[in-house]
Image (tube, helix red, strand yellow):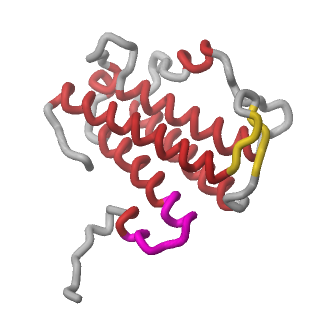
Amino acid sequence: MADIEIDPTLAPVLARTGDERAVLTAFLDFHRGIVLRKVRGLADADARRRLVPSATTLAGLLRHLTLIERNWFPILLDPAPGEVFPTGEEDAAASFAVAEGETLEALVAAYERACARSREVAARFPLEHVVPHPQLGEVSLRWILVHMIEETARHAGHADILRELTDGETGVL
């Protein structure tokens, strides 16, 4: 078999023969990385600019993804006393709101910290670990990982379109 050159930034390709956890976490981290690359090099004003009829902005996507990382991993799998998984529509809508003065740099740092915390929490449990969910009954860590791949990939696609509308920058990565 001929040697195949693989781009090392494509973690899912590198995990192509890995176990289930390796494949799931590689895909999730891949999409997390795409989101971060889509905002790199932007000014705060560009990241906050509304380019579509909804309130979706690149900065808002980062804020939303930071909150869902926190909700689906630490709050659901390892809640601190008094922490409750948010279920209201107001919570969902507010998750895209960026506070005045909140910089893109701060949003990126918060997302990176949330992802690191999510990895840390998830690593402590087997994929079969089941926890109660206030709307779904019970969910396994496996299901959470698949859901987060879907959620992050969907928003990475939104970020790709918003970045192209912002400055013409295109590309999967």
Q: Is residue 18 magenta?
A: yes
Q: How many marks?
A: 0
Q: Is 40 above or below relative to 49?
A: below
Foreground: 141 or 39? 141
Query: Residue 1: x, y in percent?
Result: 23, 89
The quadrant where residue 11 appears? bottom left
Q: Residue at x 31, y 10 (%)?
A: 53
Q: Residue furthest bottom?
A: 1
The quadrant where residue 131 appears? top right
Residue range (magenta): 14-25
Foreground: 121 or 148? 148
Q: Is residue 1 left or right of residue 8?
A: left
Q: Is residue 143 magenta?
A: no
Q: Residue at x 40, y 36 (%)?
A: 154
Q: Residue at x 53, y 16 (%)?
A: 93
Q: Is residue 76 left or right of residue 118?
A: right
Query: Residue 70: x, y in percent?
Result: 63, 38
Q: Residue furthest right?
A: 81
Q: Is 28 above or below relative to 59?
A: below
Query: Residue 90: x, y in percent?
Result: 61, 13
Q: Is 98 above or below relative to 18?
A: above
Q: Is 128 above or below relative to 86?
A: below
Query: Residue 85: x, y in percent?
Result: 72, 30
Q: Is residue 65 left or right of residue 82?
A: left
Q: Is residue 21 left or right of residue 23?
A: right
